Image: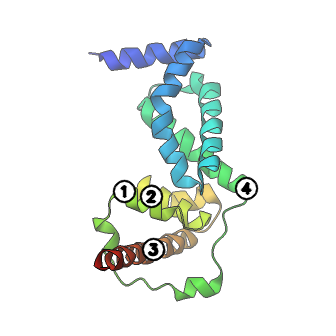
Amino acid sequence: MISTSTLFENQLIDNCIKGERKSQKELYDLYAPKMFSICLRYSKNQMDAEDILQEGFIKLFNNLHRFRGDGSFDGWVRRIFVNTAIEHIRRKSLNTTVGEGLENSIVDRHENALDSLYEKDIINSSMTLSDGYRTVFNLYAVEGFSHKEIANQLGITESTSKSQFSRAKALLRNIIQFKSGKKSSTLAS
């Protein structure tokens, strides 16, 4: 039996394909908040995230007729926005890594430090990472891509993906430990 939400979703998609503005706005309103959070994870600031969101919705509406219903619509939409974010990063050629001196100074001391953090804390802290580190971290830790898939998406080697993920984790630990120490010292005063 087909659920009411599936019927609503299918009707909404059909209406959007037909160019009905009210349905397009409804689809936008339904997905924009969730997709914006994805865009924020891959951008360094709100303005870039808004650009990615805009580009993503243009792609979504231009390719809506290609959705075959094989998987969930939500997953299909999410994939469009992740790919749009990656393309945005490539275009701006922001896929750079930090300098060798800094890379070699990162020490990965606390293997389970990230396990106890809330997703919001990680996302906020990841905003300070370089674009390359942040992208690999999000693709691997949040989106669940393998290092091989990340390497193919970003045009890097699998070992580069692994090392950037490892370095991103270490940097996040340092950032979070610094913030924790700063909060502790503020509370002590």
C-beta proximity under 8 Å, tags 3 and 1: no
**Compared to 165, does 38 lie above or below?**
above
Give the amino acid type for the residue marked by disc 3 in the picture: Ile
Mark with earlier residue (4, 3): 4
Residue 43 place in picture, x, y as percent: 59, 54
Q: Which residue is mark 2?
A: 123
Label 2 Cα crowd, 10 Å radius (few <14 / some 14-19 / many 20+): some
In the figure, residue 34 lies in which quadrant?
A: top left
Asked whether residue 146 is in view, the answer is: no
* 58 relative position to 126: left or right: right
Percent position of residue 122, x then y = 41, 62
Residue at image coords 58%, 62%: 151
Q: Which residue is mark 3?
A: 175
- For label 4, the residue is 92
Q: CA distance from mark 3 to mark 1?
A: 15 Å
Kindly indicate whether the residue at mark 1 contacts the one at mark 2 (C-beta within 8 angstroms): yes
Asked if 38 appears above or below 101 in the picture, the reply is: above
Amino acid on which disc 4 is placed? Lys
> Is 45 located above or below residue 182 in the figure?
above
Few, some or many C-alpha atoms within 10 Å of disc 1 (few <14, some 14-19, many ≥20)? few
Q: Position of residue 75 (x, y in %)?
A: 44, 37
Q: Residue at the location (62% across, 27% down)?
A: 63
User: In the picture, residue 183 is in which quadrant?
Assistant: bottom left
Above or below: residue 31 compared with residue 43:
above
Comparing 51 with 90, the one in front is 51
Label 1 vs label 4, nearer the camera: 1
Disc 2 + disc 4, Cβ < 8 Å: no
Q: Earlier in the sequence, mark 2 or mark 3?
A: 2
Mark 1 sits on what residue?
119
User: What element does badge 2 sit on?
Assistant: helix
